[in-house]
Image: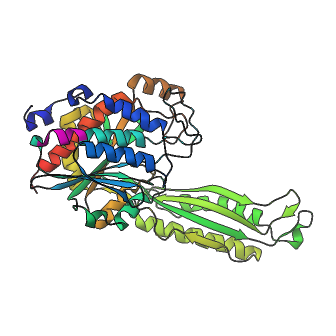
Amino acid sequence: MKPIHAWLLASSISLSVFGDPSLVKLYEELHANPELSYKEKDTASKLAQELKASGFEVTVGVGGHGVVGVLKNGAGRTLMLRADMDALPVEELTGLKYASKSKGVMHACGHDIHMANLVGVTRYLANHREEWKGTLVAVFQPAEEKGAGAKAMMKDGLFKRFPKPDFAVALHVSGEMATGTVGFHPGYALAAADSIDISIRGKGGHGALPHKAIDPVYLASAFVVDLQSLISREKDPVESAVLTVGSFHCGTKHNIISDRCDLQLTLRTFSPKVRTRLIEGLERKAKAIAMGAGAPEPVIKVDEEPLAALYNDLALGEKVVSILKKKVGEKNVIETPPVLAAEDFGRYAEGKLPIFLFWLGTIEPGRLKKQSESGKLPPLHSAQYYPDAEKALETGVPAMTAVAIGLLSSAP
């Protein structure tokens, strides 16, 4: 074997060096057999078997279908590597030969790549223990798409029943970056996410006699329009935030004025101060519209435990980025802007654990160029998104393996 330092400095390593051509087959199996949040039973079983085969101590059923594998390799630091398992309620339209066999369910967010990638990393580290010391904790997490899996695993004793990590690392696919590249953003990298339910109440009546009713459709419509001023006029323009009304339900028939409208909103922010101000403004505007019409006060429900913003630890990030540049080449490590999507990997930092998540390019450069120029590049969560898996894993497995070896070899 090459000495560790020479291995870390190598500019590129293919899957053949890892001796793991079966990873692509594993990815295809995972892609073809997706399971929704809270239902990842078969996926968890397959991944538990993979970890057991590599010599990990494996515990299943952590926080639902969560799988935890522990590999102790002498004295040293403890690193947690995490991949999420759940798929989305999306009908796949990729036309792939290994497309989803489950109607209405698809790995449209790349969790299949995350899992295959972590399996590749754990196989390598288990078979090359002479290259590192310490403890590796491999976590396959359920229910990320619900923002609930990390919380459930911690509540079930992730940091008490198993070796407590000194740091944790994950990767996430990018549908906008070329294979062979990785991306990162120091500090706040992904947003906090609030789910907000609002019932705008009125007074039901006949559609031909609106003066004898209080129309909640009108009130809710005015509220949705007025919400836009929160972003444009009440938020500091240099701060990022998104407020989207994703669901608007009211009424049953053409000529009936209903007595309520139910709205579902998502709020994305980085700054806790901005989050508080926008929620307060939202509540104020809903109540003001109701008061102006003489309607009952709206019922507003804000998540009691929202999904926190993901903050990439700066000190840990410096180490990780340095390792990535040595492994995949400096020009292939790209600092990316923050994203207002959310990821519950950030929850692990709530226990004062330094965490770092980086992006993995998944689209072959030629396809990326062609689809970008035509405006037909599918985003994550699209029914048409798919990664160029082999090329993505050829970068992702060596990159994360190098990060693991580098961090476990670093001085406390």
Q: Residue furthest left?
A: 3
What is the x, y in percent for residue 358? 31, 45
User: What's the magenta region?
Assistant: 123-129
Q: Residue furthest right?
A: 208
Of the 4 image quadrants, the one containing the N terminus is top left
Which residue is painted at 39% across and 25% down in the image?
365
138 left or right of 235?
left
Q: Percent position (x, y) of residue 176?
A: 43, 35
How many numbered tags mark residues here? 0
Residue 277 shows in the view: yes
Question: Between residues 101 and 164, which one lies in front from this camera angle?
Answer: 101
Q: Is residue 195 left or right of residue 4?
A: right
In front: 282, or 147?
Answer: 147
Quarter of the figure with the C terminus: bottom left
**Residue drawn at (63%, 70%) of the image:** 285
| Location of residue 45 in the rendering, given as x and y in whole percent from the top left corner | 38, 47
Q: How is the image coloured?
A: rainbow
Q: Residue at x 76, y 73 (%)?
A: 293
Q: Position of residue 185 (x, y in %)?
A: 32, 48
Q: Main secondary structure of the magenta part?
A: helix
Q: Is residue 223 visible?
A: no
Magenta residue check for 128: yes
Residue 272 magenta-highlighted: no
Tell me: 199 left or right of 332.
Answer: right
Is 101 located above or below residue 207 in the figure? Answer: above
